[in-house]
């Protein structure tokens, strides 16, 4: 299964854009308008979204494998 194009919903953008604008202002003394901030957010999502997504999948897979190992050990302990 492949990942579809990574994009934020408008509701997600509405939450992220003010954070991006604040960060750019604080760290770089750069005041972005809403359009510029949304454009930058879309660029970040397009260029880096799949990397973040894949890292999240890898982290989730590691947790699942760890839990499966514990379950297998508990099942083995129940064997008579």
Image: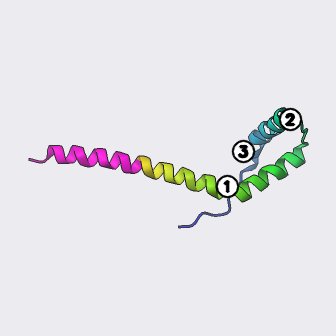
Q: Can you give x and y, in whole percent of width and height, for residue 54 in the image?
A: 57, 56
Say the numbered circle drawn on residue 49: 1
Query: Which class describes the residues within 10 Å of circle 1: few (<14), some (14-19), or many (20+)?
Result: some
Residue at image location 50% in from the left, 53% down from the top? 58
In this orientation, which residue lies closer to the viewer: 39 or 27?
27
Q: Can you give x and y, in whole percent of width and height, for residue 51 in the image?
A: 62, 56
Q: Quadrant of residue 22?
A: top right
Residue at image location 90% in from the left, 39% down from the top? 30
Say which residue label 2 marks. 25
Task: Please report whichever mark, 3 or 1, sits nearer to the chain's N-terminal start.
Answer: 3
Q: Quadrant of residue 48?
A: bottom right
Judged left or right of residue 2, residue 75 is: left
Query: Does the magenta run of residues contain 76?
Result: yes
Q: For the residues marked 3 and 2, what is the alpha-carbon distance in whole angstroms?
A: 20 Å
Judged left or right of residue 32, residue 63 is: left
Q: For the residues marked 2 and 1, what is the alpha-carbon distance in whole angstroms?
A: 23 Å
Of discs 2 and 1, which sits in the foreground? 2
Q: Can you give x and y, in whole percent of width and height, for residue 60 in the image?
A: 48, 49
- Extreme-left residue of the structure: 80
Judged left or right of residue 50, residue 68 is: left
Query: Which class describes the residues within 10 Å of circle 3: few (<14), some (14-19), or many (20+)?
Result: few
Q: Tell me the element at label 3.
A: helix
Say the numbered circle drawn on residue 12: 3
Q: For the residues marked 3 and 1, what is the alpha-carbon distance in whole angstroms?
A: 14 Å
Residue at image location 64% in from the left, 58% down from the top? 50
Query: Does the magenta run of residues contain 70?
Result: yes
Of discs 3 and 1, which sits in the foreground? 1
Say the numbered circle drawn on residue 9: none
Magenta part of the chain: 64-80
């Amino acid at each position: 299964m492949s990942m579809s194009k990574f994009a934020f919903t408008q509701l997600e953008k509405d939450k992220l854009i003010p954070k991006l604008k604040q960060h750019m202002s604080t760290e770089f003394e750069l005041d972005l308008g809403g359009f510029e901030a949304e454009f930058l957010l879309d660029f970040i999502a397009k260029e880096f979204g799949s990397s973040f997504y894949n890292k999240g999948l890898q982290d989730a897979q590691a947790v699942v494998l760890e839990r499966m190992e514990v379950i297998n050990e508990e099942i083995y302990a129940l064997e008579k």
